[in-house]
Amino acid sequence: MMDSQKGSLCELSEKIIRPRLCVTCGACVGYCPYLEYKDGRVLVLDQCQVLNGTCNLICPQLNLLKLGVEEQEANPNETFLIARSTNQEILFNAQYGGVVSTIISYLLEERIIDSAVLTNRGGEGSSRGTLVKSKEQALSCAGSRYTASGTLSALNIALKNKEKKIGVVGLPCQMKAVSLMEKHGRLEGAEIVKIGLFCTWALDYREFESLMKEVSFKPNKFDIPPPPANVFVVQGKEERLEIPLEKLRPAIQTGCAICPDMTAQHGDISVGAAEGIEGYNTVIIRTKKGQDILDECSKKALLELKPLPQENLLHLKEASNNKRQRAILRLKERNSNEGTQ
């Protein structure tokens, strides 16, 4: 049993960080002085002496271990669409349909938000959270990242700077963490727009970098085409390399196996690739806030919106449920193994 006098960080460290169940969402980094993000991982710098610290309450992984997979409540207000930007500059820089870049640019230019928490491209070292305040800065972050990036550390910086209107773009685990931050009074009165990204898994940066040593050119874009391709595409200026996904799987973060959420159910808007529809994103509107934003983007002709085809909707729900069931199974297996020790 944990000695409560060791402080609250002990639980986070012993149950999540040390056994490599951390998914590097970054919610604890920049908030707790004893935690730091470095080259794709959260590092424990020292032992915290605060009992029942907020870092435990806002960790999505610790929340999963303690409470299990939350019940899925039907949301009759959800709207499923395909969409793409009407802005050619955005489309040129975007991974697929440029929906996220378009929404963030609109929110910044209309002063609906003062800043946005995005993930930069990295460069020397892993990609990481960054705070942007203009469309130009937002476009510099366009494109998909396939490695964990500690993005929410930038949200903690924004909160410390007393910013009150903030957009956050992140993975399902990060949307869950922001919801937990709100639940436990960590948002300091800030109004947050949450744009979630579809995610099946994220890669450990250090493992990924080791794999990339085999690539003989400088990559500028990565992609995973829809099935049946089953490859990870590394794109250079002129070169292209396809890596079988099976070769990539050992680099997946261990903690991703217990994450049940593929479509960022805690976002106001969720965005992913539109499978089989080139140049478009799948978009799920989940809240009135999200609906109002999409309505305005449509009225201003910033986005082209269409209903999601029924075949795509059925496949999306199947894939989402499959991830959920895998996570439930992995959690049961983990709890069962711990119970026999």
Image: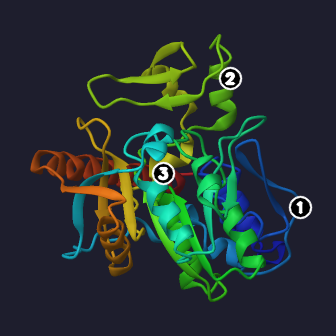
> 136 or 124: which is nearer to us?
136
Vertical comparison of 32 with 134: above or below: below
Instruction: Give the labeled residue for mark 3.
Output: 334
Identify residue type, mark 1.
Answer: Asp
**Mark in the foreground, 3 or 2:** 2
Tell me the CA gap for discs 2 and 1. 28 Å
Q: Crowding near pointer 1: few (<14 within 10 Å), some, many (20+)?
A: few
Which label is found at residue 167?
Answer: none
Residue 62: where, in percent of width, then height?
Answer: 57, 65
Please state if 243 lies on the left or on the right of 13 as rendered: left
Does any portion of residue 96 appear in the rendered image?
Answer: yes
> 157 or 204: which is nearer to us?
157
Residue 250: where, in percent of width, then height?
Answer: 54, 28
Tell me the CA gap for discs 3 and 2. 28 Å
Residue 43: where, in percent of width, then height?
Answer: 79, 52
Vertical comparison of 47 with 331: above or below: below
Numbered disc total: 3
Identify residue type, mark 3.
Answer: Arg
Instruction: Give the labeled residue for mark 2.
Output: 210
Instruction: Give the labeled residue for mark 1.
Output: 46
